[in-house]
Image (cartoon, grey):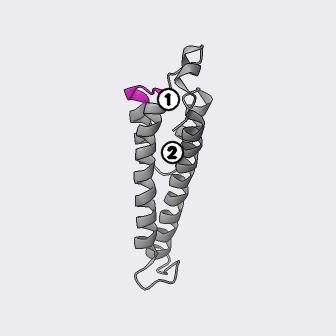
Amino acid sequence: MNPTATRTAFRAVAIAEALSWALLLSAMFCKYATKSEPFGLREGGVPVAGMIHGVVFVVFVVMCFVSRRAFGWSRKVTLVALASSIPPFCSVLFERGADARGLLESPRAHSSGATSKP
């Protein structure tokens, strides 16, 4: 995968991961706080939203490793990226910070003077 495509994919998956968190939290709120089913499904919205979030979470983890290889991330940066998928919405915060620090650029850009530390 070329760096531009990897950057775009990482950004899209980070945003999707945050949106899937919002979907899951909304479904949980409806189920447990309002005692209603948000999607009108017999089994409830939490299993549906949970499955969606689980799939997107796994894709985000895979994209972290793809990005490590494409952008030459250190072990520390990779661990921070992986950890950002656990608290809700932090994947987007990591993506924004990584982009601002030049961590979502090709390794050649790093060697030309861009910083690579988070």
Image location of residue 26, percent across then percent down: 52, 67
Q: Nearer the viewer, residue 2 or 112?
A: 2
Q: Residue at x 41, y 65 (%)?
A: 50
**Mark 2, secondary structure of its residue:** helix
The magenta segment is 71-77
Give the image quarter of residue 44: bottom left
In the rendered image, residue 115 lying in the magenta stretch gets the answer no
* Farthest-out residue, front: 1
Q: How far apart in space, not on screen, are marks 1 and 2 (Cα)?
A: 20 Å
Say above or below: 110 vs 50. above
**Mark 1, secondary structure of its residue:** helix
Q: Is residue 82 left or right of residue 27?
A: left
Residue type marked 1: Phe
First in residue order: circle 1 vs circle 2: 1
Say above or below: 73 vs 92. above
Residue type marked 2: Cys
Q: Which residue is mark 2?
A: 90
Q: Residue at x 48, y 32 (%)?
A: 70
Q: Residues within 10 Å of mark 1 (few under 14, many from 20)?
A: many
Q: Nearer the viewer, residue 55 or 117?
A: 55
Q: Nearer the viewer, residue 100 or 32?
A: 100
Q: Residues within 10 Å of mark 2 (few under 14, many from 20)?
A: some
Q: Residue at x 45, y 43 (%)?
A: 63
Q: Which residue is mark 1?
A: 71
Q: Residue at x 37, y 28 (%)?
A: 75
Image location of residue 39, percent across then percent down: 52, 79
Image location of residue 9, percent across then percent down: 55, 45
